[in-house]
Amino acid sequence: MPEQSRQHIQNTIKFAGICILLLWSIHILGFITGNSFAQYGIYPRKLEGLIGIITAPLIHGDIEHLFSNSFPFFVLTGVIYFFYPKVAIPSFIFIYLITGFIVWLFARPIHHIGASGVVYGLLSFVLFTGIFRRNLKSIALALSVTVLYSGYFYGLLPLDEKISWESHLFGALVGVLIAYLFKGQIEDDELRIDPWANDDVTEEYFLPRDIFDKTKNERNREQQSSWEQNNTNY
């Protein structure tokens, strides 16, 4: 494996791992001190609730809540960092902050905590990046996360008042927006290479190099125009 690829894999694991370590460290600290930190969640339309835009994704109600978010958070963060390195960090930051701000604006007046809003944003980003970019890599990733996390779509519905479905819904919508905004930031492995590209213009080819770029009618018109020019008397 090339050294550059090995280093990129290590950086991906490190980035995703640090995120998960932060979530677990805060939960363990809360367990040791007997503080749930829920008061630092997002409380919509209250000035003191604004701090939750930063802190809410780091706080979880119990170990089950933390477990349910840790694995998809690690996987999706790693996928974006590894496959979309040019936009990984800004995408993550925008999804994190914009989701929290919209929850603060429109959600129910309760404390909203947990990383699930960010998870839905990352999931939506990968899915819709495949739709917007439409290259083999992005489509394969979109199909993979759809299969792995198809059950997450139920989380967009207000089926349980104890679950912040607003965070899920707004996170998913923000993920679509960020995927659209960054659709033009093509990664190096997504660049289309022209197999005909060659600076040696003296090289001869059996077929015209643009044979697949023109329709039959266009080629016939070019041949007719060339024949007329060659048979014109001056």
Image (spheres, rainbow, N blue to C red):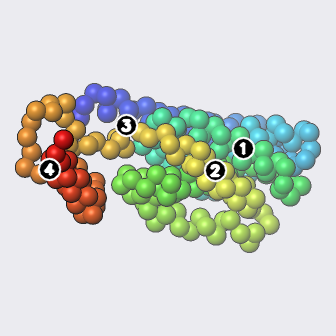
167 or 10, nearer to the observer: 167
| Residue 143 at least partly seen | yes
Q: Earlier in the sequence, mark 3 or mark 4?
A: 3
The amino acid pointed to by label 1 is Ile
The amino acid pointed to by label 2 is Leu
The amino acid pointed to by label 3 is Asp
Gap between marks 2 and 3 measured at Cα: 22 Å
Q: Which numbered disc, 4 or 1, marks the residue closer to the eye?
A: 4
- Tell me whether the residue at label 2 lies in contact with that at label 1, contact meaning CB atoms closer than 8 angstroms: yes
Residue drawn at the location 83% of the way across and 56% of the way down: 107
Report the residue marked by disc 1: 98
Q: Earlier in the sequence, mark 2 or mark 4?
A: 2
- Tell me whether the residue at label 1 lies in contact with that at label 3, contact meaning CB atoms closer than 8 angstroms: no
Residue found farthest to the front:
234
61 or 93, nearer to the observer: 93
Report the residue marked by disc 3: 188
Q: Earlier in the sequence, mark 2 or mark 1?
A: 1
Gap between marks 1 and 3 measured at Cα: 28 Å
Gap between marks 2 and 4 measured at Cα: 58 Å
37 or 15, nearer to the observer: 15
- Tell me whether the residue at label 2 lies in contact with that at label 3, contact meaning CB atoms closer than 8 angstroms: no
Q: Which numbered disc, 2 or 1, marks the residue closer to the eye?
A: 2
Q: Is residue 172 above or below residue 147?
A: above
The amino acid pointed to by label 4 is Asn
> Secondary structure under badge 4?
loop
Occupied quadrant, residue 167: bottom right
Identify the mark at residue 231; answer none if there is no mark: 4
Residue found farthest to the bottom:
159
Give percent across and percent down for residue 46.
Answer: 92, 44
